[in-house]
Image (cartoon, grey):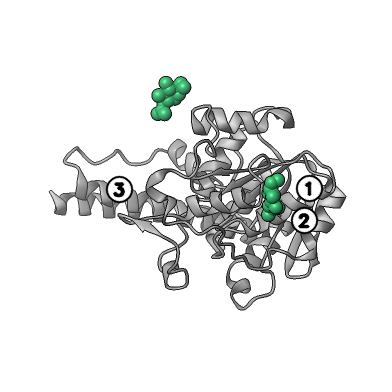
Amino acid sequence: MMKEEQHNHQNQRHHRQKKLEFITVKLVRPVAYIILLLLTYTLGYLSASSSSSTIFSSSPPPPPPSSSSIQQFVNLPNQLDHFRVTTHCADPVPSEVVRQTIVDKVFNSTSPYDSFPPAHVRNLLRKKRVKGWGSKGAVFEHLIRKVKPRTIVEVGTFLGASAIHMAELTRQLGLNTQILCVDDFRGWPGFRDRFKDIGMINGDVLLLHQFMQNVVYYNATESVLPVPFTTGAVLEKLCEWGIFGDLIEVDAGHDFNSAWSDINRAYRILRPGGVLFGHDYFTAADDRGVRRAVTLFARIHGLKITLDGQHWVINSS
Ligand SMILES: *[C@@H]1O[C@H](CO)[C@@H](O)[C@H](O)[C@H]1NC(C)=O
Ligand SMILES: *[C@@H]1O[C@H](CO)[C@@H](O)[C@H](O)[C@H]1NC(C)=O
């Protein structure tokens, strides 16, 4: 059976190669080269998928690809671009219902601060435990003064240092601003080496609780709300629910894939004229991750990056 298929497979390949030679000869060189590239790509994909189906299923091998199925894969590089926008975000909900929308959809219509802290964690929390990196930079005040945001989305919150700082700034400026803190509140593997004082119950680290305790301590529960899931999952939902940010801070995973995905998703829920910004355009790890993602993103969208301290800033207008 395997042998037969291999033979069949070789036949197919032989047939395809003949076809390729024919095309190569017929066309002028640059065009032929591009077509050749695409076909090679396509054939690689098709033969990979047909050999894997040989291993995992006992059904007969798929029929040789017709020209229409080849056509279907000609745009493969496009199809593999999972950051391509294929869905549209819902129409924006008014800023004054943003908080209630999140409370309804995420917290069963009850503020997570009600009856906080629960008895089983009370003794494991510190009165306040805030730690951030560059979370008091001048960039926050610059942007809040400029944008006068009604909704801020913070992607990557940890213990809430910058969220609390922004809440303080918006209060001083008399703005009525909701700050949504998007984070899974689990830190990262190994973060406990540096934060041994953060409690843990049966492997459940108390970051969300300590963050909320910090918000309570700073009297910011009316303006700061956690959205405690992974950044990708939340940003997709905010888009679906029509929740847009006037100001979006992206400061979660700093590896390229995380930063790239967060920035692309965040941009979709940025209100026209809003500002996207984030930390770490300068530190050692930047060029592998954040900086490369930001630079590539700005180039693709024809946007300009400005710098403010260690922060990158992208203005959508
Ligand atoms: C959600 O809220 C309703 C109404 O207050 C309540 O009856 C229900 O028990 C709540 N569900 C959960 C999972 O807390
Ligand atoms: C929070 O509010 C209380 C009561 O108004 C006040 O005593 C306290 O100083 C405030 N805390 C902070 C950190 O602003």
Which residue is tagged 3? 50
Q: Which one is earlier in the sequence, the residue at label 3 or at label 1?
A: 3
Which residue is tagged 1? 170
Residue 63 position by quadrant: top left
In front here: 67 or 90?
90
Amino acid type shown at disc 3: Ser
Q: CA distance from mark 3 to mark 1?
A: 58 Å
* Residue 259 rendering spot, x and y as whole percentages: 59, 59
Q: Secondary structure at mark 3?
A: helix
Q: Closer to the camera: disc 2 or disc 3?
A: 2
Q: Is residue 205 visible?
A: yes
Which residue is tagged 2? 314
* Residue 284 rendering spot, x and y as whole percentages: 61, 78
Q: Is residue 18 visible?
A: no
**Residues tagged 1 and 2 counted as in contact (Cβ below 8 A):** no
* Residue 2 rendering spot, x and y as whole percentages: 15, 52
The residue lying at 59 percent from left, 65 percent from top is 131
The residue lying at 50 percent from left, 45 percent from top is 228
